[in-house]
Image: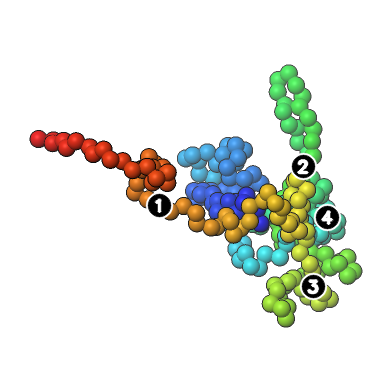
Amino acid sequence: MRLTALLSMAARVVVPKDYRYGTNRPWTVAAKKLNPPGKRRRKVFVEPIAPENWSVLRGDRVEILAGKDKGKQGKVIQVFRKRNWVILEGLNTHHRYMGKSWDYGGIYIASEAPILLRDVALIDPSDRKPTEVEWRFTEEGEKVRVSLRTGRILPKPVVERRDGIVPLQWKDGPKDTSPEDTLEKTYVPSLKTLEEEVMEKMGIVETRRQRRSYWY
């Protein structure tokens, strides 16, 4: 584990109570435009799913069960747990103009739209067909996803970051900070000033005494 991973785990984003989540991260400019201060938007009701019961992960292969791309299989590239959304690579796309102005027609691009979690199903690797899954524990105590149709374990996908690094397969190098070094307490708080700490460390003894002063 790298230092950046530990820092990202400690970071928490605070949003208003009536915040409406979308496909943009809350701290981005696009999300702030959709949720400006003082604006009240229509409440969106989302089926509550506990984090431990969430079965679809980024990198999984799933099949669409409803919609215009019903029956097609694709790879999950994004997951939005606040809205029960998943985005599949190259599927459920919609086209729109970007950068259109009075003197420029803009660019016609295609982008993937989110799909509800209930409208997709995981693919069983044994027969490449959709199946329902549930979380179970192995004899070693590991929590795994099991197909209800075949009983086979569905392994968790290996996800690469944008820089090509696989976090689960990463091995710390000589220049990486280990978790032990990161969590080690090396600072001891003191009531002394910086000058006093430097003098104490260098063995400098102050023989001068401050002249007494009276406020009255």
Q: Earlier in the sequence, mark 3 or mark 2?
A: 2
- Closer mark to the observer between disc 1 and disc 3: 1
3 or 208: nearer the eye?
208
The residue that appears at 34% across and 49% down in the rendered structure is 191
Residue 10 x %, y %: 55, 54
Q: Earlier in the sequence, mark 1 or mark 3?
A: 3
Image position of 208 with respect to 150: above or below: above
Residue 195 x %, y %: 38, 40
Q: Earlier in the sequence, mark 4 or mark 3?
A: 4
Q: Which residue is mark 3?
A: 153
Colour scheme in the image? rainbow
The amino acid pointed to by label 4 is Gly
The amino acid pointed to by label 1 is Pro
Packing grade of label 1 (10 A; few <14, some 14-19, many >=20) is few
Q: How many marks?
A: 4
Q: Which residue is mark 1?
A: 189
Q: Which mark is residue 111?
A: 2
